[in-house]
Image (cartoon, rainbow, N blue to C red):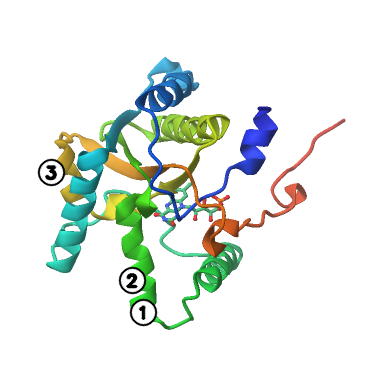
Amino acid sequence: MRVSEAINSRRSMRVFKAEPVAKADIEWIISNANRAASNGNLQPWKLYVTMGKARQRLSTAILKAMDEGDHGPGGEYDVYPKEFTPVYDTRRKHVGKQLYTLLGVPKGDAAGMLKQFRKNYEFFDAPVGMILCIEKRMGGGQWIDCGIFLDQLMLLAREKGLHTCPQAAFSRYQHVVRRELAIPEDQIVICGLALGHADPDVAPNSLITERAPIQDFTTWFTE
Ligand SMILES: Cc1cc2nc3c(=O)[nH]c(=O)nc-3n(C[C@H](O)[C@H](O)[C@H](O)COP(=O)(O)O)c2cc1C
């Protein structure tokens, strides 16, 4: 598979089939992603991989916490800017509208939205659920490194015919994730990553999100 094929066929999938993923394939993906560039070769990523009963235990624990109103202290970093300027506000709302239309959840349907949100914590039924962490002492440079590593995981998954969904939703219930996976206090939960065989026949997985043209963010200096 060409790199461009992996990039262009990657999209966030939100319905996975039960079909298992071989541990050898997961190891192959992680080993190759581990070639990611990082500032000073620090390789600051910390990865927790759950599958089988362990994956289910994590999901059950988070959903139980939600049901019991145990929302904990919340995420430990800003997933979004504190204020959205119009261009970003428009993009976020647009993709949200596209996704919820495909899911058949109308605007204002709080119960429908919550039901979909909860599916995050089942890793959208993917057989493999990963949690990406970073030590608290690390700086912005290392967050870039972890982003590169995350992208490599997602692209390498494509080469194995697998799909993914990165999930910042897990940062919100980091107190439960931390407890279940014995994540040390000096680490921040960045996000989850669902990994598995996506169901190609369901509407939400057909979403191909838009991108701004490159001239919107690229400044050239050619002479
Ligand atoms: C770090 C990160 C966290 C994300 N968290 C979530 C999430 O919690 N739940 C979800 O459904 N999608 C999540 N997404 C997926 C984005 O909504 C998606 O990447 C974006 O809309 C672009 O669509 P695409 O991935 O299909 O190209 C996340 C993406 C990234 C990069």
Q: Earlier in the sequence, mark 2 or mark 3?
A: 2
Residue 221 seen in render: yes
What label sits on residue 186 in the rendered view? none
| Label 2, ligand 1: CB separation under 8 Å | no
Check the picture and name the quadrant holding the C terminus. Answer: top right
User: Label 1 is placed on what type of residue?
Assistant: Ala
Residue 78 seen in render: no
What label sits on residue 110 in the rendered view? 1
Residue 6: image location, x then y, percent: 62, 35
| Label 1, ligand 1: CB separation under 8 Å | no
Q: Earlier in the sequence, mark 3 or mark 1?
A: 1
> Mark 1: which secondary structure?
helix
Distance Cα–Cα, label 2 vs label 3: 24 Å
What label sits on residue 179 in the rendered view? 3
| Label 3, ligand 1: CB separation under 8 Å | no
Residue 61: image location, x then y, percent: 16, 53
Distance Cα–Cα, label 2 vs label 1: 6 Å
Residue 171: image location, x then y, percent: 29, 50
Disc 2 designates what residue?
Answer: 114
Q: Residues within 10 Å of mark 1 (few under 14, many from 20)?
A: few
Residue toward you, 55 or 69: 55
User: Label 3 is placed on what type of residue?
Assistant: Arg
Residue 67: image location, x then y, percent: 17, 67
Q: Are marks 2 and 1 in contact (CB under 8 Å)?
A: yes
| Residue at the extreme front of the image, as rendered | 19
Q: Residue at x 41, y 25 (%)?
A: 30
Residue toward you, 8 or 220: 8
